[in-house]
């Protein structure tokens, strides 16, 4: 391979002599990695998908397709020159990822509601339903809505309905009176993008109903397309969740439902927060732990049972029969649980293991993880930018890399010679696994949630063995008994295990110093950390250590960020100004609870009420009746909260932020952001510095993309 590269470089004069030596050395290192080079193909495929999301304009489909075709042709033409052939193959999969992402967006095309609508009476078909606090959360496919152009009709709407509604199932036709809203926007540039998430889920609007939803007809009375086996499956999941929560009410039943059907709506928000703050939230997402334990339980139960029947054990390959049975059960579990991204990844990885048993070629390695990543990205390329994909694969790649490198030493260290030693070794293995998985997910947790839980290994040492040895086995028995109406026999003991797990989560989450709020991790920092982590985990040679440099540089980028000083959002109804202690003063309408929670989540800071006139000057916010002067970093901004403060003199301030239309008279002299700007540009954030004021908006930062709203006046 080195000779091919050196000769090619000299022949075409691509590089000077010193460059050829560097290229030859690099090629030697790549050649020494052998088949490990193939592990990078899913990385290039994912990079092509990622480039699509980085762009600020919607790209045409043909460049990706053309580049993939050219790359495939080059791969074939250079097949006798391995180094250049592999480079062309990398180009091919990169372009294929970019093209597939563009095709996915073109295929889904989910119109987004641009303005509030309602109250409006609508009829719709129920797509899915889940329990929620004080009612249900349903996703419906509405009939055409009055007052909207055909091209702007949302195909699916997510609604909260009260408990007074009729009992609904997927496929039912319903009539309801609802208030519809656009999907909640970003509260900060670079923050969590719910509009993008729901766009790829096909949901174009959210809202709530006035009064209950009334069932018109059942699935048997619906003639339009949209049913079929997928609707039957959603109906089965809904019915199973209802039967689970009927036996186990409250959050206990909600956790049981999450473990079996993937529906988490019945879990109280404070319990969900406890799971997040204790590092146990992975127990609520059906992933590798769940499918691995269920698969192992079925495999050993079937194999052990068949081994007790001598005629069968002596004549038939009971190991392969058990592997086939485990595959069938895991397939059913995948479908019943809703096939979320972590579940798909775990299914592929566990499925490869059991298939390997069937063909007598069992080998657990990073290659299985690469196959799983490729399968998940081909099925749902948009999942690359989702929390589930990133945290799931971050944990698994780290675990496989550690056990590939140190598995033998850890096995000898944790192997016990007595019962007590075996128990301590198991707990030690759980602790090591939890620590490695936690470190693998920390960058993504910091990026998406802006905090880390320090005591998660402690919670996992208790909760994971409990789930493995008690809770999940009873969950399998529950599913086996449910067709006979006997699920209570298994759900009650399953609930005991869940209650202990909730207790552990609640107590660990309240330990002093457990939750650490972190600075914001910029996207460039996350990319550096991800690249460094992949480099460290995929290669085998000493040069893998260079990945640590990229990881350190990525974390160091957090020191270059700080929360904005002023935020104006939701068409001017929400304004926040940062105090010297980091808290935010908030001026908002009573209905801005969602914007409040989003800002608190993104910044990790407490929110306090806007100061009364004459109060708060010591915190940099000196307010009069309808205006305030905000001072920070040597800059002064006028914040107008009412029309009584207009017109405002342009002198004496460096910028104006207004919850009401502020006109044009000062715009040529300084930044002026009012409610009209917030309507057009989305949430706007301002950073004040001694050398000037930086202004960024969420819509402009994302660019002209299908999920970014482009509001227009009603008369247009």
Image: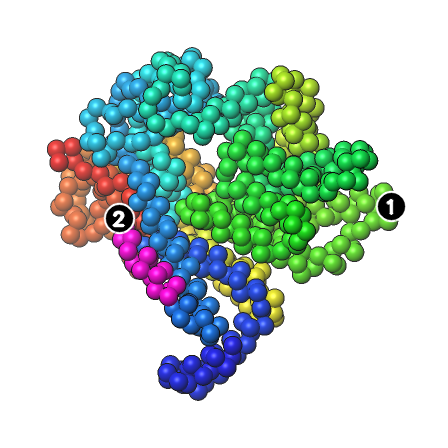
Instruction: Please say if 531 is above or below 201.
Output: below
Magenta: main secondary structure equals: helix
Disc 1 + disc 2, Cβ < 8 Å: no
Res. 690 image quadrant: bottom left
User: Closest to the observer: 106 or 223?
Assistant: 223
SS for dot 1? loop
User: Closest to the observer: 19 or 433?
Assistant: 19
Instruction: Please say if 214 is above or below 52.
Output: above
Per the model, the C-alpha gap separating discs 1 and 2 is 64 Å
Q: In the image, which residues are magenta? A: 56-73
Residue at (40%, 71%) from the top-left corner?
A: 77
SS for dot 2? loop
Instruction: Please say if 433 is above or below 232.
Output: below
- Image side of residue 44 versus residue 29, left or right: left
Q: Could you tell me how many numbered marks the image carries?
A: 2
Q: Residues within 10 Å of mark 2 (few under 14, many from 20)?
A: some
Residue 210: x %, y % from top left: 34, 16
Examine the structure image and report whether residue 70 is included in the region drawn in magenta.
Answer: yes
**Badge 1 is on which residue?**
418
Examine the structure image and report whether residue 511 is included in the region drawn in magenta.
Answer: no
Res. 345 image quadrant: top right
**Badge 2 is on which residue?**
704
Residue at (33%, 16%) from the top-left corner?
A: 175
Residue at (46%, 68%) from the top-left corner?
A: 86
Residue 519: x %, y % from top left: 47, 50
Q: Residue furthest right?
A: 418
Residue 76: x %, y % from top left: 41, 67
Residue 138: x %, y % from top left: 41, 24
């Amino acid at each position: 391979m080195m000779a091919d590269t050196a000769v090619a470089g000299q022949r075409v004069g691509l590089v000077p002599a010193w460059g050829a030596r560097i290229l030859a050395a690099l090629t030697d290192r790549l050649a020494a990695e052998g088949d490990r080079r193939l592990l990078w193909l899913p990385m290039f495929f994912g990079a092509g998908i990622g480039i699509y999301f980085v762009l600020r304009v919607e790209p045409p489909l043909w460049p990706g397709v053309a580049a993939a075709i050219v790359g495939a042709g080059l791969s074939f033409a250079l097949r006798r020159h391995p180094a250049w052939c592999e480079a062309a193959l990398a180009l091919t999969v990169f372009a294929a990822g970019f093209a597939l992402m563009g095709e996915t967006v073109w295929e889904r095309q989910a119109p987004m509601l641009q303005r509030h609508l309602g109250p409006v009476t609508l009829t719709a078909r129920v797509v899915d339903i889940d329990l929620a606090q004080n009612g249900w959360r349903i996703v419906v496919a509405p009939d055409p809505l009055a007052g909207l152009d055909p091209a702007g009709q949302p195909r699916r709407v997510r609604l909260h309905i009260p408990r007074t509604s009729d009992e609904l199932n997927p496929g039912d036709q319903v009539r309801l009176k609802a208030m519809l809203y656009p999907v909640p926007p970003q509260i900060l540039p670079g923050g969590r993008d719910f509009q993008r998430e729901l766009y790829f889920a096909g949901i174009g609007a959210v809202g709530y109903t006035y009064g209950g939803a009334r069932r018109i007809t059942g699935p048997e009375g619906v003639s339009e397309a949209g049913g079929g086996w997928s609707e039957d499956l959603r109906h089965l999941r809904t019915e199973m969740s209802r039967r689970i929560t009927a036996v186990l009410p409250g959050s206990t039943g909600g956790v049981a439902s999450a473990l079996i059907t993937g529906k988490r709506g019945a879990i109280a928000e404070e319990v969900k927060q406890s799971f997040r703050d204790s590092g146990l939230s992975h127990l609520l997402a059906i992933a590798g732990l769940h499918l691995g334990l269920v698969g192992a339980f079925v495999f050993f139960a079937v194999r052990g049972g068949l081994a007790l029947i001598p005629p069968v054990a002596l004549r038939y390959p009971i190991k392969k029969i058990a592997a086939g049975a485990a595959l069938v059960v895991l397939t059913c579990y995948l479908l019943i649980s809703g096939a979320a991204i972590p579940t798909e990844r775990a299914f592929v990885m566990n499925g490869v293991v059991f298939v390997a048993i069937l063909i007598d070629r069992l080998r657990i390695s990073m290659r299985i993880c690469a196959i799983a990543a490729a399968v998940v990205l081909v099925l749902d390329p948009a999942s690359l930018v989702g929390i589930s994909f990133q945290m799931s694969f971050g944990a698994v790649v780290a675990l496989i890399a550690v056990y590939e490198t140190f598995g033998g030493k850890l096995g000898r260290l944790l192997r016990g010679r007595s019962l007590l030693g075996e128990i301590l070794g198991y707990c030690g293995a759980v602790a090591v696994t939890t620590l490695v998985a936690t470190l693998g997910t920390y960058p993504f947790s910091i990026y998406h949630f802006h905090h880390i839980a320090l005591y998660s290994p402690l919670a996992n040492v208790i909760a994971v063995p409990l789930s493995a040895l008690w809770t999940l086995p009873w969950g399998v028995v529950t599913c086996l008994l449910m067709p006979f109406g006997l699920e209570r026999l298994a759900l009650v003991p399953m609930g005991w295990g869940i209650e202990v797990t909730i207790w552990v989560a609640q107590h660990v989450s309240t330990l002093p110093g457990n939750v650490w709020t972190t600075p914001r991790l910029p996207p460039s920092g996350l990319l550096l950390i991800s690249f460094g982590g992949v480099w460290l985990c995929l290669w085998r040679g000493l040069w893998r250590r260079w990945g640590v440099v990229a990881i350190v540089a990525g974390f160091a980028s957090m020191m270059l960020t700080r929360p904005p000083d002023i935020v104006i959002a939701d068409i001017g109804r929400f304004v926040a100004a940062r105090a010297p202690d980091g808290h935010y003063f908030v001026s908002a309408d009573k209905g801005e609870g969602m914007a409040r929670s989003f800002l608190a989540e993104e910044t990790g800071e407490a929110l306090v009420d806007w100061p009364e006139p004459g109060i708060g000057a010591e915190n940099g916010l000196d307010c009069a009746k309808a205006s305030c002067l905000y001072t920070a970093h040597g800059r002064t901004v006028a914040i107008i909260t009412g029309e009584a403060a207009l017109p405002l003199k342009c002198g004496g301030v460096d910028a104006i932020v207004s919850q009401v239309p502020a006109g044009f008279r000062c715009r040529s002299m300084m930044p002026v952001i009012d409610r009209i700007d917030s309507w057009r540009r989305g949430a706007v954030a301002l950073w004040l510095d001694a050398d000037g004021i930086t202004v960024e908006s969420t819509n402009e930062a994302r660019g002209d993309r299908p999920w970014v709203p482009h509001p227009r006046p009603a008369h247009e």
